[in-house]
Image (spheres, rainbow, N blue to C red):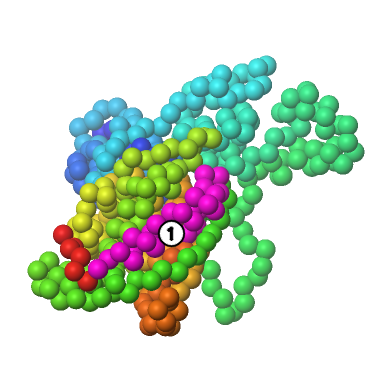
């Protein structure tokens, strides 16, 4: 018998870390090759990890709901008919589209202390750890890992503060020039202050309060929201659109549509169609920021927000510019069903270029969305309300809606965003009661 280890497999090209949210086999269980061992979550997609072997589960090697790098050993198995112990190749996850392995640290690209032996040479680091270390100029030899088997995690690098003992001579000279800085540097040199900050609260709970740890999906949502709000300078605008003709068209078609297509016809596909038409006219809205460059996306892949009782998911309507209103309605229905059945895959949520959020479905009349990183903008479609509107011919009762746009101010300015929103308004006003949905 030999002991083999199961590694956290690659879960997609852009996924560097994930967390185990549920064990499907416990120590002592006999498992067969391809039996599911655990469920992992990354980017709000849950994936089963199968076994590479037939044997007996020995022990868990990581904790639940803790972010770990791709390639981390998560479980050991006593394998039948094997004579030598070792580490297995990563299992192929059930819902994964692309395999990914961890990177090996390149000593010359990170270390800035040439006189120190490079102990990181034979260690493995996730791409996220390498990227942060390189950006901040951190020598990974100086970082204490808190992950499994002392592995350095993304949080370890983000929390790391260089001590006076490991800083360069030039830095020590600069620090000594200021009494205040010298005092601060002395405190940083303390082993206690250089350790990663514990995740504890400073307040005491009363008898009427309860702490519930966030699960893996909620932590993923939190991480994405913080990244967007921190990295993207948000700007916001609101315009009001007359959608009277669109409402009449939808009301005329909805019964026949339900009978013929088997799904309900909401207003949402009409808005998405109008947005896509405007995106084609204003390609700079369909972009993202990447390392000081603006990436223009030639596909028009619309991310839509689908809520469950506990979470908000953002699946993607691929090539929406090639779909009719009927085609868009069918895609919305298909993705919503997958979301609520818990069957969304990473591929269903990948490659979005612009997000449209139907906030009006729960009564909102104005809201500011957080941009779906790394996209350049998100549009909130609010509730349709009837209003008295002054026209050149007098006063009429019209169906009006607020459209709210959050934009990345690194890429877009008010003029570009305003022109785009005016074209969305124009497209919505051009629906006619006789318009074709196919």
Q: Closest to the observer: 337 or 413?
A: 413
Residue 395 locus on image (x, y percent): 42, 83
Instruction: Identify the image quadrant of residue 189.
Output: top right
Q: Is residue 312 visible?
A: no
Give me the residue at 43% from left, 75% from top. 392
Q: Residue at x 19, y 41 (%)?
A: 33
167 to 415, vertically: above or below: above
Is residue 407 magenta-colored? Answer: yes
In terms of depth relative to the viewer, which is nearer, 314 or 321? 321
Across and down, in percent, residue 428 comes to 33, 64
Vertical arrangement, residue 133 with respect to residue 362, above or below: above
Read off the residue under disc 1: 422
Residue pictured at 40% horizontal, 79% vertical: 393
The quarter of the rendered structure image containing the N terminus is top left
Question: Which x, y percent locates residue 240?
Answer: 45, 69
Q: Is residue 193 at all visible to an observer of this figure?
A: yes
* Magenta part of the chain: 405-432
Left or right position of 249 against 227: left
């Amino acid at each position: 018998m030999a002991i083999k280890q199961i590694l956290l497999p690659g879960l997609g090209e852009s996924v560097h870390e994930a967390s185990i949210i549920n064990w499907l086999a416990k120590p002592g269980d006999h498992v067969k090759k391809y039996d599911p061992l655990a469920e992992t979550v990354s980017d709000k997609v849950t994936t089963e990890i199968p076994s590479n072997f037939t044997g007996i589960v020995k022990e868990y090697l990581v904790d639940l709901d803790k972010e770990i790098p791709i390639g981390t050993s998560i479980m050991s198995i006593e394998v039948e008919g094997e004579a030598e112990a070792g580490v297995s190749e990563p299992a192929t996850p059930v819902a994964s589209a692309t395999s990914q392995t961890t990177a090996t640290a390149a000593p010359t690209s990170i270390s800035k202390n040439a006189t120190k032996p490079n102990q990181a040479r034979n260690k493995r680091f996730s791409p996220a750890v390498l990227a942060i270390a390189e950006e901040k100029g951190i020598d990974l030899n100086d970082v204490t890992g808190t992950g499994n088997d002392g592995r350095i995690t993304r949080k370890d690098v983000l929390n790391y503060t260089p001590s006076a003992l490991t800083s360069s001579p030039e830095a020590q000279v600069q620090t000594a020039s200021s009494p205040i800085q010298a005092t601060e540097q002395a405190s940083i040199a303390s082993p206690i202050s250089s350790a990663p900050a514990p995740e504890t609260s400073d307040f005491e709970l009363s008898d009427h309060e309860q702490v519930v740890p966030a699960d893996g999906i909620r932590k993923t949502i939190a991480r994405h929201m913080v990244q967007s709000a921190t990295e993207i300078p948000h700007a916001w605008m609101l315009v009001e659109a007359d959608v009277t003709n669109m409402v009449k068209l939808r009301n005329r078609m909805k019964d026949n549509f339900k009978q013929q297509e088997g799904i309900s016809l909401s207003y949402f596909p009409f808005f998405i169609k109008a947005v896509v038409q405007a995106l084609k006219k204003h390609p700079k809205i369909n972009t993202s920021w990447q390392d000081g460059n603006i990436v223009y996306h030639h596909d028009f892949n619309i991310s839509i927000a689908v809520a469950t009782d506990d979470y908000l998911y953002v699946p993607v309507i691929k090539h929406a510019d090639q779909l009719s209103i009927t085609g868009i309605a069918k895609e919305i229905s298909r993705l919503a069903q997958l979301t609520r059945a818990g069957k969304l895959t990473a591929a269903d949520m990948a490659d979005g270029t612009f997000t449209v959020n139907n906030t009006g479905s729960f009564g909102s009349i104005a809201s500011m969305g957080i941009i779906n990183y790394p996209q350049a903008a998100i549009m909130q479609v609010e509730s349709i309300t009837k209003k008295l509107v002054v026209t050149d011919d007098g006063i009429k009762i019209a169906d009006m809606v607020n459209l709210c746009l959050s934009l990345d101010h690194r890429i877009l300015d008010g003029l570009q965003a305003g022109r785009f929103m005016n074209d969305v308004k124009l497209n919505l006003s051009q629906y006619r009661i006789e318009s074709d949905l196919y």
